[in-house]
Image (spheres, coloured by chain):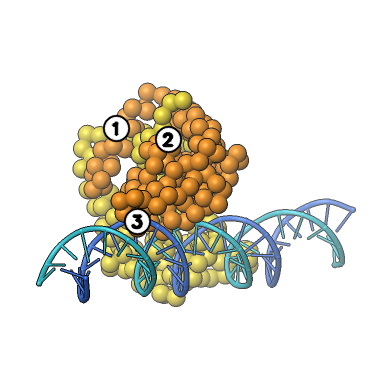
Chain colours: A yellow, B orange, C blue, D cyan
Amino acid sequence: MTKLDLEQFLPYRLNRLSAAISREFQSVYGPHHDLTTPEWRVLATLGQFGESSAKEIGQHSSMHKTKVSRAVRALEMRRWLKRRESEEDRREEILTLTAQGRRAYKDIVPKALAFEQRILRDLGSEAPFLLAALTRLEDVLHG
Amino acid sequence: MTKLDLEQFLPYRLNRLSAAISREFQSVYGPHHDLTTPEWRVLATLGQFGESSAKEIGQHSSMHKTKVSRAVRALEMRRWLKRRESEEDRREEILTLTAQGRRAYKDIVPKALAFEQRILRDLGSEAPFLLAALTRLEDVLHG
DNA sequence: AAATGACGGTTACGTATGTAACTAACCTTG
DNA sequence: CAAGGTTAGTTACATACGTAACCGTCATTT
């Protein structure tokens, strides 16, 4: 039997890296705005696409609909977004950022990009390989 | 303001990849043994290092001590490991796999390695770049 | 050797999350 | 246009998790 070294095992490594980078990134927006990850994703999706339904947000951000539902409610409480009933389909609600929400978005986005840039810069010449490899991996893992 | 595309954003991508690969890997050992991820990690660590304390397992597998504690109890219920009080330090417990636990370990390891190999093979010539890039990323993210 | 603090491990509690059940609205098919 | 099935979104429930408090043991200081 070949040996298995857990610390070198791909799923384990990806899980660790994902946790580490999420933790660090949280320290980018956390202190200023105290957002959870799902809330950040809803904010980012709405900032990027403008109006969206909860369902669309879930598709763009790979989040379960209950997660979206709760994050939307939290952002609504904070008055960062508002809901509006859709004209065509009264089951769905159109979500849009408020002025306050857009302000937060515009505050966070440059920090997020700078955070990503710092990591890519630290990776140096390896960065393009990483990005390409991640894309391949996404393909291999059936999307 | 530069645009931010969530789906291309590094923390998001890593999180998604980690979730996807974990889900697929779970389908490797899940059906046969019905293990949670923490349980699998404890099993893998004990299988790899032989006797360990809970603390050591936590260090090797990057798990919080409460997570380790619960996974250990679950594996103990299953009679896959047993505890023994340490001679030198009666606070700590030495954990070892039972014959049954070792059998499960030896059953899963080849499946795990095959799973990893399949992915690396699918990555083709990109595989070494990915592994190197992950190592760099681990360094950059403060270990 | 008594006292204080550090440490391994467990547990109580609050929070986050997914599954499943639900509501209201939509869309078929008869 | 009534009935059955589907869909967007919410909520009840069970489970997983980390923080903090805790217990017993070890180590250090006096």
Chain letter for mark 2, please.
Answer: A
Q: Residues within 10 Å of mark 2 (few under 14, many from 20)?
A: many
Residue that label 3 marks: B90
Counting from the top left corner in percent of width and height, residue A114 is at: 24, 52
Amino acid beneath label 1: Ala
Q: Residue at x 28, y 37 (%)?
A: B135
In the rendered image, the vertical position of residue A31 relative to residue B54, given as above or below: below
Q: Is residue B131 left or right of residue C17?
A: left
- Amino acid carrying label 3: it is Arg
Disc 2 residue type (three-letter): Leu
Q: CA distance from mark 2 to mark 1?
A: 14 Å
Q: Identify the element where label 2 is drawn.
A: helix
Q: Quadrant of residue A122?
A: top left
Q: Say above or below: A106 vs B87.
A: below
Task: Answer whether residue A120 is visible to the viewer in this image.
Answer: no
Q: Which residue is mark 2?
A: A137
**Number of marks:** 3
- Return the chain for callout 3: B
Q: Confirm whether circles 1 and 3 share one chain.
A: yes
Q: Position of residue A73 (x, y in %)?
A: 49, 70
**Foreground: disc 1 or disc 3:** 3
**Along the line of sight, the residue nearer the viewer: A67 or A7:** A7
Query: Which one is closest to the eye, mark 2 or mark 1?
Result: 1
User: Pointer 1 indicates a residue of which chain?
Assistant: B
Q: Residue at x 50, y 36 (%)?
A: B102
What kind of element bears circle 1? helix
Q: CA distance from mark 2 to mark 3?
A: 46 Å
Which residue, given by chain and number where applicable, does mark 1 sit on?
B132
Q: Is residue A92 visible?
A: yes
Q: Is residue A46 above or below residue B36?
A: below
